[in-house]
Amino acid sequence: MELMDIRLFCDLVETGSFSRAAERNFVSQSAVSQRLRTMERQYNLKFLERSKGKSVVRLTEAGRILYEGARPLLLQADTLDAQVRGLSDEVTGSVRVATVYSVGLHALPSRLKPFLFAYPMVNVHLEYSQTQRIYSDVLSGAVDVGIVAVPAPRTGIEIVPFGVEEMACICAPEHPFAQKTELTLSCLDGEEFIAFDDDIPTRFLIDEKLREAGVRVHIVMAFDNIETIKNLVEIGSGVALVPADTVRAEVREGTLACVPLAADDRFTRSSGILLKRVERRRAAVRAFVEHVRLLP
């Protein structure tokens, strides 16, 4: 059994997806399937079961034993690799980055482009994921860098500031709010509201600000993806509070209106870079962080 086979298997278990496991390791989906079949033939055991007609994968008992034994081996191998590579100052190789949609689609590209120009020998592998999975993937070493909104301290994780975004109210162009130059949070009382899912840190932030203002909105739908929230607001299903920078394109195109909050009600959303606490990082990871971090 090769280290690459172990890594593919662990990534497959953790992502629950052949395609995502393939993306993480820069191989084809068929290569993942083939290497899994080779491992199963080698031991004459089934490690994974797939439900008929579904993409969900489940561990067999043999698969559970393999995963529980393989994960510590991978962590040791990754730690050793980082220690050896960290001795070199050559900025080459790959940087695996996981981020949430609202940050990765809007704030990251303008900082990523100069980095890629400065270090053409570095391959940045970017994936979009949910906040809690990003924390887990950073801790496990599945990704080198995580970027999340409203970062919270976690044991074993270092947080580097990434950005600060002004929050604003968005609505359909025909909504009465679109004619206003600013809004107080009290204006939202009783409004139909498109929210982030209740396990999203940005939702915690918004709920706290509305509660402090004594405002109760009528949440009609909630999503973990800001693009879906924007789409629902565009068709008039409700209003929402989002970072103003995330709707600049829609405002230019006239499909959304973005109304700033009044001075007394203004608040911001911070975002941060998540890194596993280690003694020394690879040069490519260090360079990436220095290029994309929030400058003082």
Image (cartoon, rainbow, N blue to C red):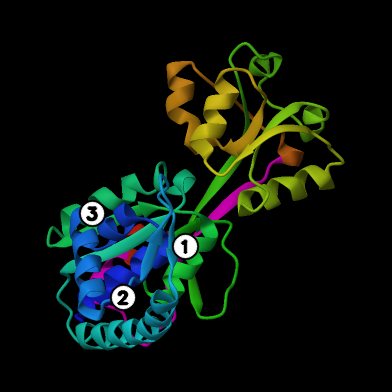
Q: Is residue 278 left or right of residue 207?
A: left
Residue 291 is labelled as none
Q: Earlier in the sequence, mark 1 or mark 3?
A: 3
The residue range painted magenta reads 266-288
- Residue that appears at 26% across and 58% down: 22
Q: Earlier in the sequence, mark 3 or mark 2?
A: 3
Q: Residues within 10 Å of mark 3 (few under 14, many from 20)?
A: some
- Kind of residue at disc 1: Ile
User: What secondary structure is found at the residue carrying circle 1?
Assistant: helix
Q: Is residue 274 magenta?
A: yes
Residue 134 is labelled as 1
Q: Quadrant of the C terminus?
A: bottom left
> Where is residue 84, by image quadrant?
bottom left
Residue 45 is labelled as 2
Q: Quadrant of the N terminus?
A: bottom left
Q: Is residue 250 above or below residue 54?
A: above
Using the image as rendered, state which of residue 131 and residue 108 is in the foreground. Answer: 131
Q: Residue furthest front?
A: 44
Visible residue check, residue 217 = yes
> Where is residue 253, by image quadrant?
top left
Q: Is residue 181 above or below residue 39?
A: above
Residue 29 is labelled as 3
Q: Residue furthest top?
A: 174
Q: Residues within 10 Å of mark 1 (few under 14, many from 20)?
A: many
